[in-house]
Amino acid sequence: MSDSRAEALRLTDEPLLALSNVTCAYGSKAVLTDVDLTIGKRQFTGIVGPSGSGKTTALRVLLGAVAPVRGSVHRRAGVRIGYVPQVETVNWNFPVTVGECVLMARTSGRWLPWRNAAERAEVSDVLDRLGIGDLTARHIRELSGGQQQRVFIARALLGQPDVLLMDEPTSGVDVSTRHEILHLLEDLHHDGLSIVLTTHDLNGLASHLPHLICLNNSVIGAGTPIEVLTVDVLERTYGARMEVLQHAGMPVILDQPHHRMVAAGDVVPIRRTGT
Amino acid sequence: MHNLLRPYDFEFFRNGVIVATISGALCGLIGVFVVLKGMSYIGHGLSHAIFGGYAASALLGVNFILGAGTWGIASALMIGGVTRRKLIGADAAIGVITTASFALGLALFAVFGRRGRSFDAALFGSILGVGIEDVIAISLVTIAVALIVFFGYRKLLFTTFDPDVADASGVSTARVEALLMVMLAASILATMQILGVTLIAATLVIPPTVARMLTNSFSRMLLISTAIGAVTGFVGMNLSYHLDVQSGPSIVLVGAAMFAIVFVFTGARGRMRANAFDVH
């Protein structure tokens, strides 16, 4: 971020992004109804909700890729947005190396296809920062799940964003990769980046975030995980009753046991032992 | 050796070889975008649609490039618009627009008789009648397409790989995709005489498929596909003379042979890479 732009953004409390009474529809089906949402500086927010609840649409409205049918979208003048798509939507067989993929963030300002020295240095810096500096020439398919996610974060970061929007960053990855991504996002947030992500992962990701929004076509609840991951809010969000425990100051969400399967002996309830 | 060079005594053959080589390179280049965007069926359909314009311009005595070109570009933009807006299924839209145009071309020839350029040449390709004006036309189209791909490389790559994010990042993907359709229509139009409408789709698909099996890089794929297209056109045209078959089938068969060789030698790795294509 240039110094003058960073200074301009620092001097105001105006939100970076805001949705006001936003309603979105695909055809006649409304996916978001009267949604209010504000993203400020250094905010780290997770959007949770069931499939079809409008999480990705909310991100795409913030990004500007989807126009609301009603309501307004506010983007602070000069704000830069980075977008990291859901890995399931990426064509991993597309012939593109890590370096080529990251450089896609630079489509304006230079007409020649190849990287100049400054761009080479920038790509190298951002890949080094994310710990994948030695993978520039590799094809995107030849990477692990965590490395693939980092490539798209690197592409977003090359655009020097103020806000990073991420769609299901831990979808389909194993536990260690999820930890890896979460630590990386914490570092980026610590460096001053605002982050908004969607997730289905209540225990592995959502409960670790500082701020959550529960969405099911409209906002059901917003606040810290302790405030919103409650039995009542979760039931209204997911339409299913869940149990909420607390562990190390964080909520832990459990599904209700499936009574018929338990009764039939297919599931043996675990007897709690110790403390 | 003398036998191999004998056809070069004829001017029409020299022109034919030049046009076939440039046509192959052009189709190889534009074909990369066609296959990576899953537009193979559009390329196939568009070549048939342009046949309608070809027939109409022949009957009306209008310049072929002007008549069929206007028709082709209008069809291309119409297909692109319908596909983009998802008004009806893309396959259905292409099927209706292009086959109706092709049928109109056949009907016009049936009612008014075959005039102007050869009817068979339009369908299957021929080097007979290839003149210096064809060499100039194909060269101009190729230079224009190459310049657009060179200077628009970054936007074309982003739009082809990730159109949603490209759009949100400030790339006018609608404009880029319209430009791709216009380049495709111009390429088909310029190569129709030598390759024939029924076989153009193969020259759009085979070189990039072979190139994809050989590389994982987009920039290298563009270069390799263009080179394979040029070699295929050159070898196919020479074989066309010596085997006494039409230029279109000869060029396509050389491309198919090249595909088979690369397919065998790159093995599972090549096949996995070629899975990138969602060929419709």
Image (cartoon, grey):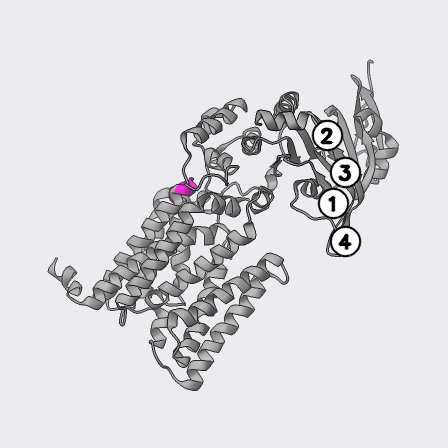
Residue pointed to by mark 1: A52
Q: Between residues B33 and A273, which one lies in front from this camera angle?
A: B33
In whole angstroms, how far apart are the C-alphas of marks 1 and 3?
8 Å
Q: Amino acid at mark 3?
A: Gly
Secondary structure found at label 2: loop
Q: Amino acid at mark 4?
A: Lys
**In the figure, is residue A64 to the left or right of B73?**
right
Q: In the rendered view, tell whether residue A179 sits above or below residue B232.
A: above
Q: Quadrant of the C terminus of chain A?
A: top right
Q: Is B233 covered by the magenta stretch?
A: no
What is the crowding at mark 2: few (fewer than 14 residues within 10 Å), some, or many (at least 20)? Answer: some
Name the subunit of mark 3.
Answer: A
Give the SS element for disc 4.
strand
- The quadrant in which residue B137 appears is bottom left
Looking at the rendered image, the disc whose residue lies closer to the viewer, 2 or 4, is 2
Q: Amino acid at mark 1?
A: Gly
Residue A100 relative to residue B86: left or right:
left
Of badges 3 and 4, the one in the foreground is 4
Residue A56: percent from left, percent from top: 69, 41
Q: Which residue is mark 2?
A: A40
Measure the C-alpha gap from mark 1 to mark 4. 11 Å
Q: Earlier in the sequence, mark 3 or mark 2?
A: 2
Q: Which mark is residue A29?
A: 4
Does residue A245 show up? yes
Precedes in sequence: disc 3 or disc 4: 4
Q: Residues within 10 Å of mark 1 (few under 14, many from 20)?
A: few
3 and 4 marks in contact (CB < 8 Å): no
In three-dimensional space, the C-alpha distance between marks 2 and 4, rounded to whole angstroms, equals 30 Å
